[in-house]
Image (cartoon, rainbow, N blue to C red):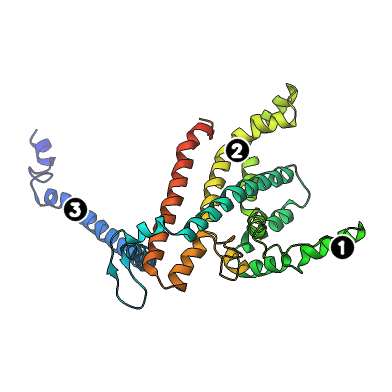
Amino acid sequence: MTAVLSNRPAAGSEAGGPRGARGPAAPRGRSRAAAARRRRENLAAYGFLAPWFLGLGLITIGPIIASLYFSFTDYTLIGGAEWVGLENYRRMLEDPRLHQSLAVTFTYVFISVPLQLALALALAMVLDRGVRGLPLYRSVYYLPSLLGGSVAVAILWRRIFGANGLINQVLESAGGLLGMSASLPGWVSDPEYALGTLIVLNVWTFGAPMVIFLAGLRQVPRMYYEAAQVDGAGPARRFFSITVPLLTPIIFFNLVLQMINAFQTFTQAFIVSSGTGGPSDSTLFYTLYLYQQGFGSFDMGYASAMAWLLLMIIGGFTAVNFLASKYWVFYGD
């Protein structure tokens, strides 16, 4: 019994002795080292993100706050800003050119965006049938989306639809072959057709939504089409009963994205009209009129108020789209 007791560890060696005292200290030391390492890693991460945060503050958030302040002032970029309250917003209610620019912009958006999406979906369905050389066609059709907003394409468009442009030359040649002659308008210089040429230009940039539609079509299960075909459903019935409902999330995404882009269209109207919005303000887009006020007349206070109105218009239409989406967008759940 004495031998057994003598082989047992001394009292306090596990809990109260020096060895027991060192036991809890080791985890605390490791936790402090891990915390210090995490702090160093976080500091390194913030160091790498610092340029982005600096750009966000100086290039994005700062100008947004400044434009909101200037929208309540009379600021001409030359003198100081004088606080005028809601005068710029009241002035917009009485500005006939601003009303004309809104009418032109709404017409452009509500005609060009549906036509663009319809053409993009139609071509996506053609390519989804397994066309040989699909990557080539996809790249070729996507190219206009990359070039459509460029200055070079806008200049080319003005040349094509000019009085002596390619379109009129083709029509004159066709009329000569048919024995007909007629005076053809300069499409970009005629108030009746100038906006139509810009709508055609926007419809031509269907590549980006087409690629998105094509990706969505690849996700539709083929068994749905096979079952509908067995039941006797024709192509039109399969399109409206299967393709459209299952593509509604993609249609909604493209609709919101293209509508926002259409409201912000500027380069095409600026180049085609030489910065005037002509002829007869038929291509006076809202963004172009905003540019004229801010950088033509140096009325930056009024231009800032116009910018905030445009933000509210885009935000309003986007909110309406999201609210209405629950009635027609099908997510399958």
Q: Nearer the viewer, residue 2 or 85?
A: 85
Outermost residue to the bottom = 78
Q: Are marks 2 and 1 in contact (CB under 8 Å)?
A: no
Cα–Cα gap, marks 2 and 1 = 43 Å
**Looking at numbered disc 3 in the image, what kind of residue is underneath it?**
Arg
Q: Secondary structure at mark 1?
A: helix
Cα–Cα gap, marks 1 and 3 = 89 Å
- Kindly identify the residue that appears in the image at 36 percent across and 66 percent down: 301
Q: Is residue 269 visible?
A: yes
Earlier residue among tags 3 and 2? 3
Tag 3 residue: 28
Q: Position of residue 104 (x, y in %)?
A: 55, 55
- Disc 3 packing (10 Å; few <14; some 14–19; many ≥20): few
- Disc 2 packing (10 Å; few <14; some 14–19; many ≥20): many
Q: Secondary structure at mark 3?
A: helix
Outermost residue to the top = 231
Tag 1 residue: 173
Determine which of the numbered discs, if any, sits on residue 247 in the image: 2
- Disc 1 packing (10 Å; few <14; some 14–19; many ≥20): some
Earlier residue among tags 2 and 1? 1
Q: In the drawing, does residue 287 fall left or right of residue 152?
A: left
Determine which of the numbered discs, if any, sits on residue 236 in the image: none
Q: Secondary structure at mark 2?
A: helix
Q: Are marks 1 and 3 in contact (CB under 8 Å)?
A: no
Vertical placement of residue 309 versus 70, above or below: above
Cα–Cα gap, marks 3 and 2 = 56 Å
Q: Nearer the viewer, residue 169 or 239?
A: 169
**Looking at numbered disc 1 in the image, what kind of residue is underneath it?**
Ser
- Kindly identify the residue that appears in the image at 48 percent across and 67 percent down: 291
